[in-house]
Image (cartoon, helix red, strand yellow):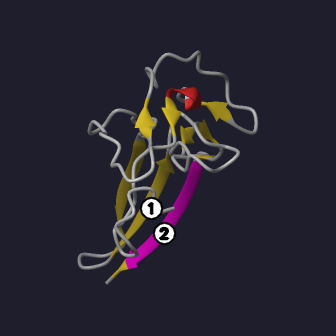
Amino acid sequence: VDYAGVGPGSGTQFWKVTGDPNSVTRTEFSSFAVWFNKDAFAKPDIRTFAPFQRNIVRSPGFYNWDLGLRKNFAVTDKQKLQMRFEMFNVLNHPNWGGANANPTSGSFGQVTTKSGERQLQLAVKYIF
């Protein structure tokens, strides 16, 4: 919505910050998790730009550890067999998606996605 009245192509216009967005009790993730206080934002006044501080709300961080093991077995002088075992997200830690930053959405201020299941991979390679 063009609240400032500058016409199309003006980009995203920020909403007013009326409180502390970080003053919220974050919830456990079930199908969503509350990440910031959505009541700390209000529509800007008509024909004005709302002042907005950079990085006032941050999305959840990312936590991931990978592990790989490799062993080479000599078959002949110039040939070998390589076996690899790799684990992605060894600790099986879930990583939450970004918080919904669209103030007109019903899930504004919530994280609704997560990813990060552990994955195992076994590979055999013949090098000649």
Residues at marks 1 and 2, CA–CA distance in whole angstroms: 5 Å
The residue at which mark 2 appears reads as: 124
Kindly state the secondary structure of the residue where label 1 is placed.
Answer: strand
Based on the picture, tell me whether residue 92 belongs to the magenta stretch.
Answer: no
Mark 1 / mark 2, whichever is N-terminal: 1
Q: Residue 9 falls in which quadrant of the image? A: bottom left
Residue pictured at 53% horizontal, 28% vertical = 36
**Residue 25 marker:** none
**Image vertical order of residue 44 relative to residue 121, above or below:** above
Q: Which amino acid does label 1 sit on?
A: Met
Kindly identify which residue carries mark 1: 83
- Amino acid type at image mark 2: Val
Q: Give the range drawn in magenta.
A: 119-126
- Where in the figure is residue 23, as x and y percent of width and height? 49, 16
Residue at image position (50%, 39%) is 90
Specify whether residue 63 is in view: no
Q: In the rendering, at what x and y percent does residue 3 appear?
A: 45, 56
* Tag 1–tag 2 contact (CB < 8 Å): yes
